[in-house]
Image: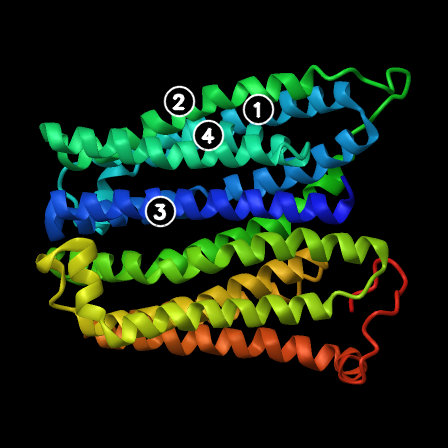
Amino acid sequence: MTETKKLVRSSGIIFTGTIIGSFFSYLFNMLAGRLLGPEKYGEFTALLSMMMILSVASVAIMTVTMKYSSELVAKKYFKALHKLYDIFSRYTAIFAISLIAITLAFVKPIGAFFSISDIVPICITLLYFFFVFLLVVNRGILQGGQKFFDSTANITLEMFLKLLIGIALIKIGLGLSGAMLGMIIATGIVYFLSLFPLKKLLETNDDNKSEPFLFNKKEIVAFSVPVLICSALLMIELYLDIVVVKHYFDAETAGLYAAISTTAKIILFATSPIVSVMFPMISAKRTMGNKYYKLFFASTFATIAGALIILGVYTFAPSTILRVLYGTEFISLYSFLPKVGFFILLYSLVNLMANYYLAVKSYIFLYFFTFTLGLQLILIGFNHGSLNSVVEILIATTGLLVILLFGFYLISRIGQIKAFLRGEYNKPIAAGIDN
């Protein structure tokens, strides 16, 4: 199989798995909303937001394990790969247990911040991190070993089991605790299932038995830091709206807004496969010294086009969309769906640009991101008198970030843009040069 065919096939696997997994995830959210009602659903999405924000380190861990395992597999250093697995599994387990212990000490303040009186669902949610951090190590090594089908199937199965087990536990009367417990059980199951393809990869014959391999810890840390910061910023930006609304507004409003925000995020999940395909393709082109800004422009156009189609549906039929997905209980704030959808469209562009800059190893964008997120927090802190004010601040600050990220790209690549307009984009360049 040629590299091009392999790339297309692998991208197709990831795209299909993402779509199916996103469908199960949204079905879980919609059914949970219907069964829990607006108030409890607001608590549910607040806990999910807290879960995602606290798990940002897992994204960095997965990216790092994927990078270094891919290098080891390419060189056929499978003994070193096994060592990498042992090291990362051990340290991530220690980190996960420490995170759980520390956060459990603040469970009551967390409950007070989110206006959740029952601390049991919060405690259950925190236990989720043990399996999550171990699971991302397994998935990172599987993807680094180009076992795309195994890793994608594992993710899709996790979404399906969360739906199946979580909804079953809600229906038997466990409510919010059941929803969170279902997520833990599902994650635990897929963690143990991921060990089977992982074991097969790790037991591959080592063709370089006599070649010693030493891990460059400084290099690993240097690569991990910007990835971790970027992951944290993206996660906070994505889930900040739900956290803020749950903190500053009443329980019913928070639940109604959570349904709107979750529905709006369909824009992100529909366009994120474009980013997943763009990242490795740009990395490969950069390594080979080929130009990649035509690919970047195509990815940007596809992201905007896909997002606008969904946003158009939200604009013309917001109440119908919410009624179909969540029921009549959730439609009173339907007019916010187009606005929140536009915020997610802007976020999708931020996500694309952030991944682009990581792919070309240019980290200046983190300063722009930190500035606008800080500005967002300050403005919301001083002006949260109405839901409309919060949403408008989210749109304005995220829009500013999009302008800064694209503006920096255009200013730093005037020469390449002129070459593109002249049709001179196929000539190779020196490897490693940003273009």
Q: Position of residue 81 (x, y in %)?
A: 72, 24
Q: Which mark is residue 96?
A: 4
Is mark 2 in CB contact (under 8 Å) with mark 4? no
For label 1, count other residues whose C-alpha is less than 10 Å away and answer few (under 14), some (14-19) or many (20+): some
Is mark 4 in CB contact (under 8 Å) with mark 1? no
Q: Amino acid at mark 3?
A: Phe
Q: Nearer the viewer, mark 4 or mark 1?
A: 1
Q: Position of residue 14 (x, y in %)?
A: 55, 44
Q: Quadrant for residue 179, please give it.
A: top left
Q: Earlier in the sequence, mark 2 or mark 4?
A: 4
Q: Nearer the viewer, mark 1 or mark 2?
A: 2
Q: Nearer the viewer, mark 4 or mark 3?
A: 3
Q: Which residue is mark 1?
A: 89
Q: Nearer the viewer, mark 2 or mark 3?
A: 3
Left or right: 188, with 63 as reference point: left
Q: Nearer the viewer, mark 3 or mark 1?
A: 3
Reply above or below: 162 against 38: above
Q: Which mark is residue 189?
A: 2
Residue for point 70% across, 20% down: 83
Q: Which residue is mark 3?
A: 23
Q: Earlier in the sequence, mark 1 or mark 2?
A: 1
For label 4, count other residues whose C-alpha is less than 10 Å away and answer few (under 14), some (14-19) or many (20+): many
Location of the N terminus (image quadrant): top right
**Whole-number angstrom distance, CA of label 4 to CA of label 3:** 29 Å
Is mark 1 in CB contact (under 8 Å) with mark 2? no
Reply above or below: 37 against 289: above
Residue 378 visible within the image:
no
